[in-house]
Amino acid sequence: MPPFHLAFPVHDLAEARAFYGTLLGCPEGRSSEHWVDFDFYGHQIVAHLSPDEVGHRATSAVDGEAVPVRHFGVVLPVEEWHRLAETLKTAGRDFIIEPQVRFKGEVGEQYTMFLLDPSGNALEFKAFRDPAMLFAH
């Protein structure tokens, strides 16, 4: 699968480095005084210093939860998803949506969790026991 590229705003590059680099373990790539690249599970994300653009503003109802409309994330293997959930809990991170199973017993059953980065960008991490369910209806 080709890697995707995503650019997103942050209000502080040092905080972005601490969150994406240190907490999530995403290796840093190129950078300048205005942006920094991260290897986000094999994909290129770029944190751009743009304080006026940060934060999520709207939610959408999904399986009884208020999901941030603007968010990004990654689909992980189930074991890695559980490890990340524990890492985030141990680090004292607050969740918008606590680690849980969504669509339990239905097509598309998945583990999911949402949290904000230090700039208020919403991230979702999910996992499927059956990866074929990613695009199932």
Image: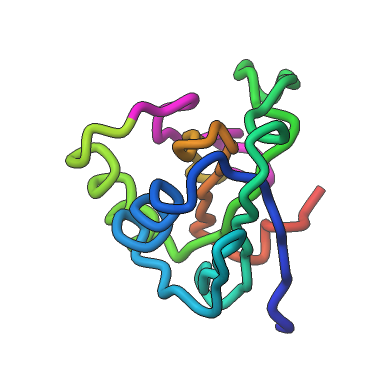
- Residue 104 location (% of width, % of height): 54, 34
- Residue 73 location (% of width, % of height): 59, 52
Q: Quadrant of residue 11?
A: top right
How many numbered discs, if any?
Answer: 0
**Which residue is depicted at the point 56% across and 44% down?**
124
Q: Quadrant of residue 65?
A: top right
Question: Which colour scheme appears in the figure?
Answer: rainbow
| Left or right placement of residue 31 versus residue 1 in this view | left
The answer to whether residue 62 is magenta is no
- Position of 67 relative to 84 (above/below): above
Of 2 and 13, nearer the camera is 13
- Residue 37 location (% of width, % of height): 57, 70
- Residue 47 location (% of width, % of height): 60, 56
Of 67 and 103, nearer the camera is 67
The single residue placed furthest to the bottom in the displayed view is 2
- Position of 40 relative to 105 (above/below): below
Of 18 and 70, nearer the camera is 18
**Which residue is depicted at the point 68% across and 51% down?**
8
Of 41 and 30, nearer the camera is 30
- Position of 13 relative to 96 (above/below): below
The single residue placed furthest to the front in the displayed view is 33
The residue range painted magenta reads 94-109
**Which residue is depicted at the point 73% across and 72% down?**
4
